[in-house]
Image (tube, rainbow, N blue to C red):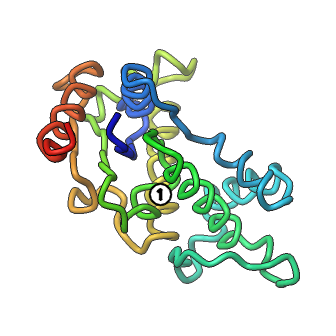
Amino acid sequence: MRNIIVTVARQYGSGGKTVAEMYAKKNGVPCYGRDILRMASDMSGISETLFGQVDEKLKNGSLFGISKKIYRGELLPPSSDEFTSPQNLFNYQAKVIRDLADKGPCVFVGRCADFVLTDRTNVVSVFVHAPKDYCLEQARLRNSMSTAELEKFIAKTDKFRGDFYHYYTGREWNDARNYDLCLDSSRLGFEKCVEAIEAYINVRFKELN
């Protein structure tokens, strides 16, 4: 099997996570998402709860007002005053991502994996998006909220993802130039999104067939 790593960023309600999981299952490779937090906790010895708390602080906007903490690859030792800083917690997540990518083909959902692995030639970065109405329709399948509540929830979730990405990468999350493929799931459907990723891989890595 070709050693291809796929990273998937996605708007809430676009089905990007589902597409990632479907691609992984079809191709018999692992798919990683928030479980990276647990792995980073195991690697660092820092409580997984703390990783989650930092995510919540970022989600509430309490950290995004300060300067960006662009990922550079360094890990701070336990002796450092910044050992449990948001930047170092992300550094450990990035180390997990890079180590998993070293082991073989896999899929990563979110966590700025496309940026963390930007130096690798075997990575295919994908952004899954869809119009507002479609995302709202899909979100209704998983959430028992009113339309107004769902709209606010989707907007807040996407803002967090955009802010999170910008904080650690310095890039705009929804900028097509950051990705190899941008797929509208409302036009293709989930299965054809998977097929589009596979087709791109077959063209780009034809010599590895």
Residue 84 x, y percent position in the rendering: 80, 70
Image quadrant in which you'd find residue 128: top left
Would residue 206 appear left or right of 95 to someone viewing this image? left
Q: Please tell me whether mark 1 sits on a helix, a strand or a loop.
A: loop
Residue ID at (56%, 75%): 73
Q: Is residue 9 visible?
A: no
Would residue 10 appear left or right of 126 to someone viewing this image? right
Would residue 200 appear left or right of 173 to someone viewing this image? left
Residue ID at (22%, 45%): 182
Q: Is residue 127 visible?
A: yes
Residue ID at (47%, 57%): 112
Residue ID at (44%, 45%): 155
- Position of the C terminus by quadrant: top left
Residue beneath label 1, please?
112
Residue 42 in the image: above or below residue 64: above
Residue 111 x, y percent position in the rendering: 52, 53
Report crowding for label 1: few under 14, some 14 to 19, many 20 or more residues within 10 A (C-alpha): many
Task: Please state which of residues 75 and 19 is positioned toward the viewer in this rendering.
Answer: 75
Task: Please state which of residues 32 and 98 is positioned toward the viewer in this rendering.
Answer: 98
Residue 57 in the image: above or below residue 109: below
Instruction: Give amino acid for label 1.
Output: Cys
Residue 74 in the image: above or below residue 138: below
- Position of the N terminus by quadrant: top left
